[in-house]
Amino acid sequence: MLTSARKSLPTLDYVSIVRSVYGDRRALLFGAFASAAAAGLSAYRSQSFALFLIAVAFVAVGFIRYHNMRAFWRAAIDSEDVEAAEYWEIRATIGGGMVALVYGLWCLVSMLLVSDPYAELVSISLSMAAMVGVCARNFGLDRLVAIQTVLLSVPLAMGLFFRGDFYHPVLAGLLVIMLISFRKLATDIRTILLSAVHGRVEASRLAGELDMAMRTLQHGLCMLDEQGRVRVANDRAVRLLGLLGIDNMIGANFTDVAQKLSESDIVSEAVVRRLMSLVAKRGTGKILLCLPGDRYCEVTISSRRTNTVLLFEDISERVAAEERINYLARHDGLTGLPNRTHFTTVVAEDLQDRREAASLGAPDRIVALTIVDIDDFKHVNDALGHVVGDQLLKEAGRRLREAVGSQCTLARLGGDEFIIYRNQMIDPTEAEQDAEAILRAFAQPFALVETAISVNVSVGVVVNPPISDDLDGLMAKADLALYAAKGDGKARSQIFHAQMDVDYHYRQRLKADLQEAITNGALTLAFQPLLDLATNKVVCCEALARWDHPSLGSISPTVFIPLAEETGLITDITNWVLSAAARQCQNWPADISVAVNISARDFRGGDVGQMVTNALETSGLAAHRLEIEVTESALIEERDLAQAVLDMLVERGIGIALDDFGTGYSSLSYLQALPFSKLKIDRSFVADIATNPRSRRLLANVARLGRDLDLTVVAEGIETAEQLKVLQDYTSVDLVQGFLFGRPLAASGIGALIDQLNDQTFDNFRKHG
């Protein structure tokens, strides 16, 4: 009861209550003078000196409290200065206690010393009025109220109690109880007032936070009351709806807002109807609004009880991102053309429509599918880098689009392949015209990164396929036509025809039979000798795989070797040839070696070094008697892998020959960078050297180049004595190979051929052929 309010009140409330006690010093001074006047009047009536002293006391205490109030306001304490507030609370308690004691003494003197009814009435009446003022003024400070109540009620009760009769003590008790209840009343007033203040502060805080949230909310917000009127809308909502031509929406009925939306022609009526339906039903849902300037707004409607909230979210960036993602999912990132997945979806749907239309009796639409492949694109990547390769692909896509026009569906199939679908043709020849336009588009060189390069394309086309063909079937047929175009020398187009399908199934049968032949050991080896022009002796034999099919007869290596490379069986064949050739070479004279061809697929898919090691170890053949032949195409496809393997083989003493020189790019960089010991000139250089001086000079220069690089030079394809004579007379060729000296023979006959050739001279070949 006698503790400071500081301990029970928050700082802000405590300082505010202390400040309220010092509120109106004029009213306080007026009350003191009024009480002093009443006490003086009673003193005059009763001629009581004691009451006169009471009157003087009222004036003195009044002036003391007045000057105390002035000092408080001069101090100007801060709202957070709780120490200063407690100091002024103590001073207010002292001043309040003094005035309460004067009122109590006034009542005591009037009842015990004066015994004047008027003095008693005035003192008790004004004292009760003063207590009411105490409760009203000092309710916030419980200690002050308690002290004033005690100091006033105790003298008052004593004056009544000692009157000597029964009734006055009873009245004293009742008055004390009433005065004590005044303290309880003050407490209730304090609680109610503080609760109201706290409620108002909390409401103000929440209102401020709500206003801040509304202002900083990243979305527009609009709230409707139970009558459908717009009661709350933040700035973003106002701006968004302003783009739709709606102004002054606060207080407007949302039906009118929706009507303006409908009349603006910016939002469709269907969207407006759905929006109004959700609002009218107080439902929940989302609606997409299209705003001017390619902007999008998602409206989320939610209702609770009688209110409806509309949240406007600007999703333009999200829509743009989704559109970008969808675009990237359907288009090639490099060329910008549709990708395989999107192309498959579009074309499969069109082919399905074609089948359904045909089933209803509609005339058949002529369609065509074209596959375009850039010839030798890997060489461009390897020689010029992937940056140039990517530039070439982008430019190729642009040229293809210009060549076939927008009426076709053009896509990048993957790698260096493009695919074209045309679904509206009047005549099948239009597909041939498209193919010719594509070839013409690639006739001009490409200017890429300050480098001009010429590339060609091969084109496979399937036109007006049967209704039952699906996309996979069309692509298979176009691939067959493309394969035929490449087989005819590349840089050309080919239309699919039925024989290609027959050839395709034939090839598929050969693939399966070749697998079985390898598994069952049905392949055989043939050997063709290489003769030294200086010694007239056989120095090497080239090992060649042969396949005698049980029902189709002898299958040419030009047929089954490409099939083996395509299916990956070539490594199995190479491994077998290495082992068998090494074993056979052990049966020949020690100065004769054996040569085995290695494919590009072997470098990529097999461990060439390990295969060679196994062949040498199992056969016991010396490493210098084994020679590995590689073609320029193998080096183009797997340059890095090939170089690493060849370097390792050379370190072991194995010879390396560059086969078929002159049929590829004839890049001199390979001769310089790779560890070749032998250069085999392709038969195409030899074919007409006996009759064409130009061919003879070309062959002589190539042979001289090889000799200058310290390479053993071999001429392949020697078939006539005239060719042999030219080689001997005009070139510096070291070794010769060809049918003039014998066709490839099986292992059982090659030994006898070696003996026969070693017993002859080249003069015999020149005389008898």
Image (cartoon, rainbow, N blue to C red):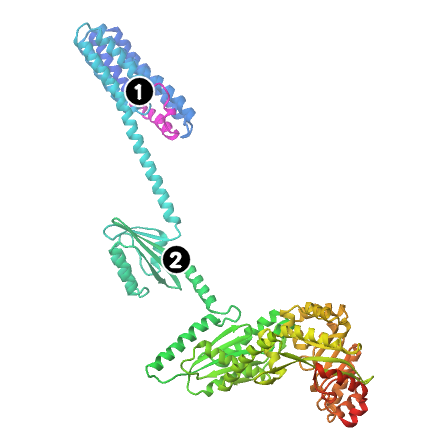
Task: Tell me the quarter of the image containing the N terminus.
Answer: top left
Residue 636 vertical placement versus 535 (above, below): above
Quadrant of res 757 = bottom right
Pick whichever of labels 1 and 2 is earlier in the sequence: 1
Of residue 763 and residue 192, the one placed in the foreground of this image is: 763
Residue of label 2: 314
How far is the residue under mark 1 from the one under mark 2? 61 Å
Number of the label disc, if any, that sits on residue 556: none
Give the residue at the far right of this rendering.
535
Q: In this view, does 642 lie to the left or right of 105?
A: right
Which amino acid lies under the numbered mark 2 shown in the image of this protein?
Answer: Asp
Q: Are marks 1 and 2 in contact (CB under 8 Å)?
A: no
Residue shown at 36% from the left, 39% from the top: 205
Crowding near pointer 1: few (<14 within 10 Å), some, many (20+)? many
Residue of label 1: 145
Which amino acid lies under the numbered mark 1 shown in the image of this protein?
Answer: Val
Quadrant of res 10 = top left
Residue 493 vertical placement versus 47 (above, below): below
Numbered disc 2: secondary structure: strand
Residue 760 magenta-highlighted: no
Numbered disc 1: secondary structure: helix
Residue 23 magenta-highlighted: yes
Q: Position of residue 179 (x, y in %)?
A: 25, 18
- What range is drawn magenta here? 1-30
Q: Position of residue 434 (x, y in %)?
A: 49, 84
Residue shown at 67% from the left, 71% from the top: 639
